[in-house]
């Protein structure tokens, strides 16, 4: 068999991109004409590059999923607080006990019914408020209860908080 450089013809047949040539860096390297003469290619380079890039892409993808989930839950908490405030400002509502069932129903519908959230209505006695006075509904949810990865790999907030203030309606 004829020799090509210092390699056998058998190796040249195995190479898919033409005959193997010994490059300036010795055996194991070959020239590839991919844009400019003299570009070096070494077997396994793509594997090493993939080993570097794939974990980064995986973290980026999981981060997008995690933060998307957190934003969804923050929006659902805000909606529950807004609905609680709408009920609290009605003229015939005199106690915050009328507001809590509406908040609890929306939190349960959002899958957060047993997540350890706290809800407060300020002021606590709604019957003493006159028209135009502010009523604030605040919901606090522990951030750990909505962390879908649970690995600590990505930073998450300690608490998700939603507070809505509306003016009490008149009679």
Image (tube, helix red, strand yellow):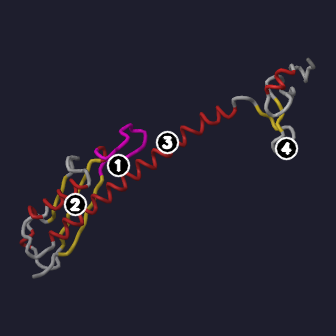
Name the residue tied to disc 2: 138
Label 2 to label 1, Cα distance in Å?
Answer: 17 Å
- Label 4: which residue? 36
Residues shaded magenta: 145-159
User: Which residue is found at the position 12% from the left and 81% from the top?
Assistant: 170
Q: Residues within 10 Å of mark 2 (few under 14, many from 20)?
A: many
Residue 25: percent from left, percent from top: 83, 27
Label 1 or label 4, whichever lies nearer to me, is 4
* Inter-mark Cα distance, 2 to 3: 33 Å
Foreground: 85 or 38? Answer: 38
How many neighbours does mark 3 have within 10 angstroms: few (below 14), some (14-19), or many (20 or more)? few
Of labels 1 and 3, the one closer to you: 3
Label 3 residue SS: helix
Give the residue at mark 1. 157
Cβ–Cβ below 8 Å for labels 1 and 3? no
Secondary element type, mark 4: loop
The residue that mark 3 highlights is: 59
Mark 4 touches mark 2? (CB < 8 Å): no
Q: Residue furthest right?
A: 2
Circle 1 sits in a helix, a strand or a loop, which is it? loop
N-terminal-most mark, 4 or 2: 4
Inspect the magenta stretch and tell me whether residue 60 lies in it: no
Q: Earlier in the sequence, mark 2 or mark 3?
A: 3
Residue 72 or residue 94, whichever sits in front = 72
Foreground residue among 154 and 76? 76
Residue beneath the point at 17% across and 79% down: 132
Q: Earlier in the sequence, mark 4 or mark 3?
A: 4
Above or below, comparing residue 147 to residue 118 in the picture: above
Quadrant of the rendered image containing residue 165: bottom left
């Amino acid at each position: 068999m004829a020799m090509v450089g210092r390699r056998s013809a058998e190796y040249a047949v195995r190479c898919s991109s033409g005959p193997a040539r010994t490059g300036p860096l010795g055996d194991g390297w070959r020239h590839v004409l991919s844009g400019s003469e003299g570009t070096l290619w070494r077997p396994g380079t793509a594997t090493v590059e993939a080993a570097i890039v794939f974990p980064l892409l995986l973290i980026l993808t999981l981060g997008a999923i995690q933060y998307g989930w957190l934003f969804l839950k923050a929006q659902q908490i805000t909606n529950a607080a807004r609905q609680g405030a709408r009920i609290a400002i009605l003229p015939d509502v005199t106690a915050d006990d009328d507001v809590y069932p509406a908040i609890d129903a929306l939190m349960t519908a959002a899958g957060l019914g047993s997540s350890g959230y706290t809800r407060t209505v300020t002021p606590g006695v709604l019957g003493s408020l006159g028209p135009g006075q502010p009523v604030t509904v605040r919901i606090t949810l522990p951030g750990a209860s909505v962390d879908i990865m649970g690995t600590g790999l990505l930073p998450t907030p300690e608490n998700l908080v939603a507070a809505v203030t509306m003016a009490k309606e008149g009679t």
